[in-house]
Amino acid sequence: MFTRIIVLTITLAFYGQTFGQSTKPPTPNAFDKATAISYALKQNADLRVIRKGIEIAEARLARTGLRPNPKIAVDFASDFAFNREGEHTTGLAFQQEFPLANRLRKAKAVSRVDIAKAKMEVRLHELEIANEISEIALEIQIVDTRRALLEKIYQKTSEISAFIQSRAKQGELSILEANQSILELRALEQEINHLSDQRTHLTHSLAPLLGLPSNEEAGFNTLQEIDTNSELPGFDSSIYERHPVFQLAVLDAHSAEAEIALAESENWESITAKVFLENERSIDQPNGIGSDRFIGVGFSIPIPFRKKGDLRANEIRIERDQSNLKAAAIKQRIQHDIEHARHEAADFQKRTIEYRDNVIKLANEQLEATSAAYQKGQISLVSLLRAQEQLLRIERRHLDNQEAFARARLELERARIDLPQFQSANNL
């Protein structure tokens, strides 16, 4: 009997409403999904480490393409071990290597692509962190929605329990019903506490993503409701421009092209040029020992008999073709994932809207008609309670549908990278 009374009161309290509203007001200075992502992209400890890769690539570019340092060569020859007539030769030369085939410029081209790849690696990790935060934000929203429902139920159940206990003290109701009401309240308290603990665990899991100390908890505000009427976007070719996985595959192909050009330039080794000064002291008959001085230039030109660069270039061409195939496969998979996620989200959205507009609407109308019939004495209390219990189950099912749609929509957002911080491919 007590259970039916509770059902009656709860159902009447929720009459004409749909679940999914959060009763907790926004906490001052707390994060929401957008601000949490923006904060994490600036403060996340792992991202700070990964961004060092960009600095390393830029430092590598600064030293790439520099000519070898010049050399100073010193020569000395003497006849002290042979005739010992005092003859000797002294030479001083300045040598410089000059790479051929624009090898230094091509080496810089490889390093520039490496910088772009390092930036895209950062973008990939940023997206992974943003997706983790988005998932946690949705779970917190779902927890808040369910907790708001239970808090409303608890409030009404408390009123009923107080009424029953007061009547039990006067002997109008059974003490068993009073104890049952207390048991119902304790069960609701446990369920609400479980959701509160679950929310706390979720907010704690945000701390490392946001770069907060382990002893600091992030306040988090969620949306007031799960919107099931929003438009679901589909595939857009501009997604390729900001998709880090696809862009990394494209950059791998560009890097291979640059490395092919560099490898082919290695067929020609460097030319070595030198300027030298030579002093020769020798015996000149009949004048005796004297000195002669010379100044001149010299060149060392390589001959490309063995084109080892071509062998390396052939290997890189295979890697380039592999990268192009990989990019094409990723491109196709992106489009497929988006269309699949949109189709699934659209199905859940259609199911949720139809359930709300048809089933819940009809259940409310049925309850209203049943209540009117009961007040006129046309039906029994049992029939009314059954109608109320049915509406409660329907409302809970509607909340399940909303949550399923919200998760499907999140998958679509992830496939499309629909986050403000990632709308521009140049926002690195």
Image (cartoon, grey):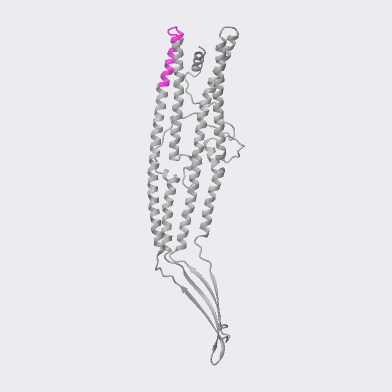
At 42% from the left edge and 43% from the top edge, which residue is drawn? 239
Asked if residue 160 can be seen in this view, the reply is: no
- Compare residues 347 and 199 and report the one nearer the observer: 199
Q: Quadrant of residue 86?
A: bottom right
At 53% from the left edge and 48% from the top edge, which residue is drawn? 50
Q: Is residue 267 left or right of residue 162?
A: left
The secondary structure that dominates the magenta segment is helix
| Residue 84, x across and y down, in percent | 57, 85
- Compare residues 107 and 20 and report the one nearer the observer: 107
| Residue 401, x across and y down, in percent | 44, 27
Any magenta on residue 190? no
The boundaries of the magenta stretch are 359-380
- Compare residues 119 and 38 and report the one nearer the observer: 119
Q: Is residue 246 left or right of residue 148?
A: left
Q: How many marks?
A: 0
| Residue 388, x across and y down, in percent | 46, 16
Any magenta on residue 379? yes
At 58% from the left edge and 9% from the top edge, which residue is drawn? 168
Return the residue found at the far bottom: 286
Residue 65 vs 230, above or below: the answer is below
Q: Is residue 354 left or right of residue 182?
A: left
